[in-house]
Image (cartoon, coloured by chain):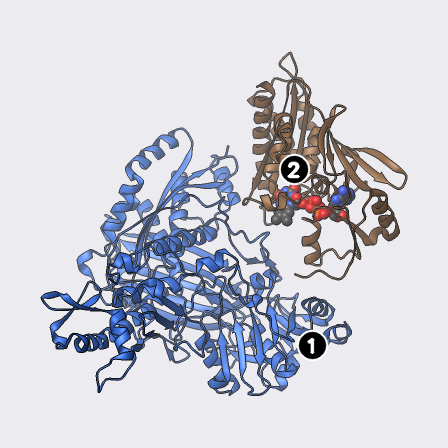
Chain colours: A blue, B brown
Amino acid sequence: MATTTTEQLGGYGQSVKRKEDPRFLRGKGTYIDDIKLPGMLYMDIVRSPFAHAKITNITTQPALDIPGVLAVITGKDLDAAGLAWMPTLMSDRQMVLPVDTVMYQMQEVAAVIADSRYAAADGAAAVEVDYEPLEVVVDPFKALQDDAPILRPDREIKSNRIFHWEAGDSAATDKAFAEADVVVEQDMYIPRIHVASIETCGCIAQVDEVSGKLTVWMTTQAPHAIRTVFSLVSGIPETKIRVISPDIGGGFGGKVPVYPGYVIAVVAALTTGKPVKWIEDRSENLQADSFARDYHMKARLAATQDGTIKALDVVTIADHGAFDAAANPSKFPAGLFSIATGSYDLETAHVEVDGVYTNKPPGGVAYRCSFRVTEAVHMIERMVDILADEIGADAAELRFKNFIQPDQFPYKSPTGWEYDSGNYPAALQKALDQIGYQDLLREQQEKRERGELMGIGISTFTEIVGAGPSNTFDILGIKMFDSAEIRIHPTGSAIVRIGVQTQGQGHETTFAQIVADELGLPVDNIIVEHGDTDTAPYGLGTYASRSTPTAGAATAMAARKIRAKAKELAAHLLEVSADDLEWVDHKFQVKGSPGSSKSMAEIAFAAYTNHPQGMEAGLEAVSYYDPPNLTFPFGAYICVVDIDRGTGMVKIRRFLAIDDCGTVINPMIVEGQIHGGLAMGMAPALLEEISYDEHGNIRGGTFMDYLLPTAMETPAWETGRTVTPSPHHPFGAKGVGESATVGAPPAIVNAVVDALSHLGVRHIDIPITPWKVYKILEEHGAAE
Amino acid sequence: MIPGQFSYHAPATLPQAIALLGEHGYDAKILSGGQSLIPLMRFRLAQPAHLVDINRIDGLAYVREEDGALRIGALAREADLDAEPLVHERYPLLADAIAVIADPLVRNLATVCGNVAHADPANDHPAVMLAYRAEVVAEGPSGRRVIPIDDFFVDTFVTALEPNEVLVELRIPAPKPGSGGAYQKLERKVGDYAIAGVAAQIVVGADGLISEAGVALTNVGPMPIRASEAEESLTGRHPNEKTFADAARLASDAADPVTDLRGPADYKRAVTRTLTARALQRAAERALS
Ligand SMILES: Cc1cc2nc3c(=O)[nH]c(=O)nc-3n(C[C@H](O)[C@H](O)[C@H](O)COP(=O)(O)OP(=O)(O)OC[C@H]3O[C@@H](n4cnc5c(N)ncnc54)[C@H](O)[C@@H]3O)c2cc1C
């Protein structure tokens, strides 16, 4: 008898062990750098030591004199081929190699091609470049002043302002502020940080000598979109371009953009006729690849004296670096930042963002974040605490008072979003109960009396993920649907191909679980493929927690198409009308006659051996799913910190995360995503930052100073869950990959500020370094 | 992060190593654990033309107590010392420091002698050796010489070693009765170099007064710093909070830090005070137990 329960099949809600783990845990994954092609050459890149300079001369001969060095490619060479610039996803353009001016430190200046990695590196060190330094602009506020040099004279508009963007109702917001009992205001800066995935970026470009077909193995989260862009830019038809994204060692948004190195490697492969490999080193990755955040926000909340929040106003300066190479949906230059009203039922809101050029690397990637949601959540969760402090309210009570209530869903937000579902009070209550909030408050009181510093911080965030509906969401015109293709083999095993690309999320397991449950096939018999544009259906890739909301939905829809055909086949086999069949216990059964049934394996066999006349053979389906809305996961996080008065060190004693991502496919994988996300949320709160000195020199550009947390810094995370399914998703799921990264930072900051609030502290910008805390302690006479 | 070109030598004996060093002079570098040198080479901050790898030389990987001193051979790794019960029982200051140097992977390779020879003010062992009043044994073409630790550190990354000398042994005086020591290090995250570090070693005499004190500072100046005035203030006093607070203030005055990514200079000076008081407190607890 075939297995039929969800548990036996490994369907929805089952902690199936990850199918990808055996190869990863044994070191048998295939990353770009594991691929070696015969005759392969290596590329290394010469980079600028200056943040803004004219290139007066490049001498390549010393590099060419090194044995093994075959070619040096400069901006002038690319310019001759019309390839010195490339388009960005945000309709800006970006230098591949500069013809005469460098725009940021570590920018690519030339590339050396050699027959070994060592020769290439020696060649890169030998290229001589003469620079004439230009005025450097690192501060976006200065970039907007009238006397600032125009950083991008190549653009028609002679201004360092890239865009001005607004959402919400400005007039109504002004009115609400004018009439408010209480107004709180705070400047906040979310610094530049870097995804710092363990695998750096790289590629191998190969041109087939006979067919002329270009194959690029590359570290990309979106192979199809990349191929289309390559095709549009180069004029080469897509049939002659194949992009393969093999195992990826972490993406987090950093592998969505197209970096100059990829393009130069392709040019090098075309000109040398040999495969060319380019792998960034760690410093290049940290210092030149797209960064995240860098938002300067001025936020205001208007409220009544009893703490009813009426309105929100945020004015933001967004530092985008030298090129607008952010990776947002094209109609959203500031991403989904207008989700800024969060989990609260406000009357009105107004949000403004100005994007600005500076002499820094480009980016604004959605680092484990659905397009600027992290910045928005940080702001609103901090502002709610600041309001609580202002009116002397408890931070939890104030949240309960202002939450969107469960019966208000679907909820239309003042900035125009329609939240699909939520139950915020339930999540927060569960968190308070689980962590023992009242006991913690008592403990804090006692400690304060003894002069010890302890803080409790809450964050009740709402995310907005799963871009997105085709009426609003596209990237360079390509709609943000996603896809799945399922083929059932005669003996009841199946292959699933999806348009999204895993970088550690466990798609090979969870997408198989969807098919297992929808079709009644054991999960072990289902394999999932992705990442090869020659075989996978078209999709926009994995980022912004969109895989399950889009391609996951497509997978369920394709499975349901197969089930519809399977019903006809079962009717044929059971010699009844299809109307007389029902899908029970993962098989088709004659209504009222449980003994008469056909399993999917039996049906699949018949699809190839015994299909009825007039019906096509085979059992397969494709679905391109255009989501009707985004999904809105949420959570309630509580953090408890202790502060060392002698050093200012913050120690996270406890951290509890209650998450709600709707229907859960695999609880163990969700747990893993939350744990990883929490570590990545803690990192910018306490440790990570990339900053620049006034000359545009990067500070913190290696792992010596860019402080990734280790197991020693992270606390033992506590987790829990509520389940509020998405009403519009085929099986009720929302995204989850980013919730923790988005929700954790303000919980930590709120805890630290709470520990110091009796000293009059209202806000501390992240990262909260021990010296920032110590300075506060000294100023208030509270240092040891 | 690929180093430039270099020649690699793997001598089998110390005299061979010394001869190679003599031949290549300042173009040569000794390779022991490689945990400081190789990162510098990969960043191309150091580009020695010759590497003289001493790892194949027999008889240098010891740690033992002999003739009134703990003797640490050139190839004794941090992990070797950590695995030695004697170090934990009798040299707690040293054991404390080893536990907070880098991470276990680095400690499996890094040598204690290399740590001192590198003379990086950010390294932890230089301050430890200052607090212990250790001795450095160097071997060159004309044999061995013993260098008091106070004469060893000359400048940032510069020591009293000649280019053709190998640091073959560190000698820490065996603890007298009533000895106690401790190392306190503040770091941005585990495995990092110190924001500030303080090594304290004291002897409490039969009269209950501090008879000897060593206090030295990590990464708060261009070189490891002996806090002499703090040491002087401790001797002859009772080991109590007041004594330690006074010494801590003097140690903090001795610090000469710069503002960098590990914090502003005045912060480093302030935490030097906190760490000194804590190190002395712990050292005293150990001395009295
Ligand atoms: C990730 C990381 C974190 C680290 N964190 C810390 C830390 O927190 N605290 C800390 O103290 N250190 C730290 N280190 C440095 C580490 O302890 C080094 O290993 C140590 O500084 C040098 O020891 P080594 O044996 O590796 O020497 P090597 O790197 O081989 O040599 C260092 C220098 O000393 C010279 N040298 C080495 N041995 C001798 C000898 N016997 N005689 C003469 N000259 C010699 C070499 O020529 C070279 O110039 C860290 C290193 C890494 C990679």
Judge depth for marks 1 and 2 and give the one in front: 2
In this view of the protein, which residue sits in the foreground, A384 or B179?
Answer: B179
In the rendered image, which quarter is residue B175 located in?
top right
Q: In this view, does B28 lie to the left or right of A580?
A: right
Q: Residue A72 got which mark?
A: 1
Q: In this view, does A743 lie to the left or right of B190?
A: left
Q: Can residue B211 be seen in this view?
A: yes
Give the structural element (helix, strand or loop) at label 1: strand
Of all residues shown, which one is farthest toward the top?
B207
Give the residue drawn at x 51%, y 88%.
A235
Asked if marks 1 and 2 fall on the same chain, the answer is no
Residue linked to disc 2: B80
Characterize the local packing of mark 1: few (<14), some (14-19) or many (20 or more) Cα atoms within 10 angstroms.
Answer: many
Which image quarter has ligand 1?
top right
Amino acid at circle 1: Val
Q: Disc 1 is attached to a residue of which chain?
A: A
Q: Height in image: A56 above or below A678?
A: below
Residue A521, image x, y percentages: 29, 66
Q: Height in image: A640 above or below A122?
A: above
Residue B9, image x, y percentages: 80, 53
Q: Height in image: A177 above or below B130?
A: below
Characterize the local packing of mark 2: few (<14), some (14-19) or many (20 or more) Cα atoms within 10 angstroms.
Answer: some
Q: Can residue B258 be seen in this view?
A: no
Amino acid at circle 2: Asp
